[in-house]
Image: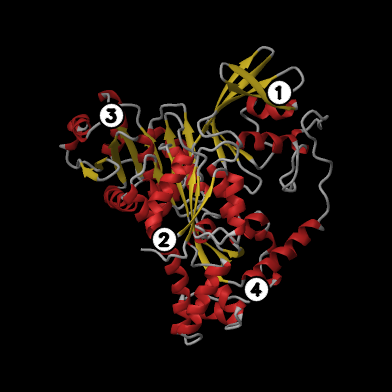
Amino acid sequence: MIPQQTKILCVDDDPVSRELLRHVLSPWGCEIFEAKSGPEALEVIARENIDLVLLDIVMPGMDGYEVCRTIKGSKRTRSIPVVMITGLISKEDRIKGIEAGAEEFLTKPFDTAEVRARIKMLLKTKNLNERRTGEILIELGLINDQQLQEALKFSKEKNVKVGEALYSMGALSRDTIYWGLSNQLQMTYIELSPEMVDKDLIQEFPLDVLRQWQCLPLYETNAEIHFALADPTDRKSVAAVENLRPGKTVQLHLGLPEKIADVLDYYEREIAQAPPLSGRQPCPGEPVPSSPGDVVSTGAAPDSTGPWECLADALLSMPQDAICWLYETAHGCRLLTKKGSAFEAAGEYPAEVYSPFRDRAKSFPSTRFRRGGAITVVSDRSRVKPAAFKTHLVDAVDGGFVRLERIPVFSSEAFERSHPQVPSLVAETGNAFEEHRRLVVGGPDKIFIKQLGYSLLMKHFRTADFPPLVFLEKEPDIYLPGAAQVSGSRWDLGIFLKSLGEEVSPFVFYESDALEPESVAACLSGFLAGRLNNVIMCLPSASAEAMREALAGYLDQPPKGFRAVFLETSRLQSIA
């Protein structure tokens, strides 16, 4: 059972669904609140100390994703667990929910026992985290059990963390609380000041992102980057900070949240006092400079409304799997989307916005746009939430257009949550890869194999930014940050690596076209010759038997010089 004073909010525009949830929860005797829309839910959360939210995704107006992002974006409410209940079951829908901050998912029609089990687990985890912080302080002799119980009650009533409760009650100073936590967590507690932060380093990160996660970059080496973090017990904060610098080991130190805020305020003033950028940022429809490089500078303010920022905002608003077109006109270009059987303009932009798409040799004039093979990547103003689009260019005599298809962006958290066996599969695949540093992976789900290979190489084998991980793909279907994704061509691995030069030896993931004997022979010739290292080859196959048959002529040749495994989402089966 759960405490009777627990407050649960049920958000759904369907009254039948809300009534069903009330029926499921009523035996617990907890206090149940209802909301039939997103804005109404946020009003309840602002008024009541809600312990958990059951949230429908598909609602008119403000959908569940936006409600969840709003809850998780507030310091006061971001610790409230959110369970999304929906009839949507695709992987993309779950990834969107995870990115919005949801802790759990339930699919309609849901099982009563499963709903209760998920809720009990989330509430227990939340309460244990708060209690553990207090127990650490008790072990150090800084507070007693009675003070902890009072602090837990205070934190429940005021919806604050137990450390904040102890400080508000006058039981401990902030310095004492953080000193105690740093000793128990074996972390360095740092008395922060602006002089302790690398001025050039902090400007590489958006200040609003650093504020959101209450962290500060301190210094960086070739292999590591050090951050001060206000709450290292918050799993999401730690994961977010670790993702701020992919490919490097992140070392965390403890810092007071108000000191972190003071340093961020200091640098925000420093940046504001810097010399202004030359020229005003034009908006769509205004005259633009002749040089695209003058349109948007890499130092543009976060609230800039130049044409590149406006286009980025429009593209970021597109749903997953959306398709749109950037169409060149006589005086500029239009962003077109399809509505039913007709097309409508989503925005008008100057000609300079279209030209980088047309001219593949040019670089994008904004840091918010970058290319990777046939993928165009657009990031939000904080540059931490990118959107990726497959691009197809069609040139005409008097113009042209670009087809943009949004594809998923890899998320390690989403991938690990897609199946509970992911961590063990990564470990097993790593063991198989280590044997010869040449591995053939077969399976029916090439995207899953690709994500597994990317996770393995990024986590265990990547040591520097260059050479990057190389993904030779038939066609990009997911964006892999930090990897060089090369698509649209059939490559011979040996020729490709030779073209890089003898001094460059990257890790390569190669996507084979098919199980046809000629294709398999061409791909495996390099493996058998022993001239390729650090290569994972994806061999699409419907079953382990089909893969074994395709490799039959090579498995018996001593020495094989490579490992072969068949991957299902639940287990890894050795072929040879």
Closer to us: 456 or 230: 230
Q: Quadrant of residue 126?
A: bottom left
Q: Residues within 10 Å of mark 3 (few under 14, many from 20)?
A: some
**Disc 1 designates what residue?**
333
Secondary structure beneath dot 2 equals loop
* Residue farthest along the left direction in this orientation: 556
Above or below, 13 against 205 in this view is above
Closer to us: 314 or 68: 68
Q: Find the distance from the CA under tag 2 to the CA under tag 4.
A: 46 Å
Closer to us: 334 or 397: 334
Looking at the image, tell me whether mark 3 or mark 4 is earlier in sequence order: 4
Q: Is residue 60 left or right of residue 332?
A: left
Q: Find the distance from the CA under tag 1 to the CA under tag 3.
A: 45 Å
Question: Of tags 2 and 1, which is closer to the observer?
Answer: 2
The label shown at residue 520 is 3
- The amino acid pointed to by label 3 is Val
**Disc 2 designates what residue?**
29
Q: Quadrant of residue 111?
A: top left
Secondary structure beneath dot 3 equals helix
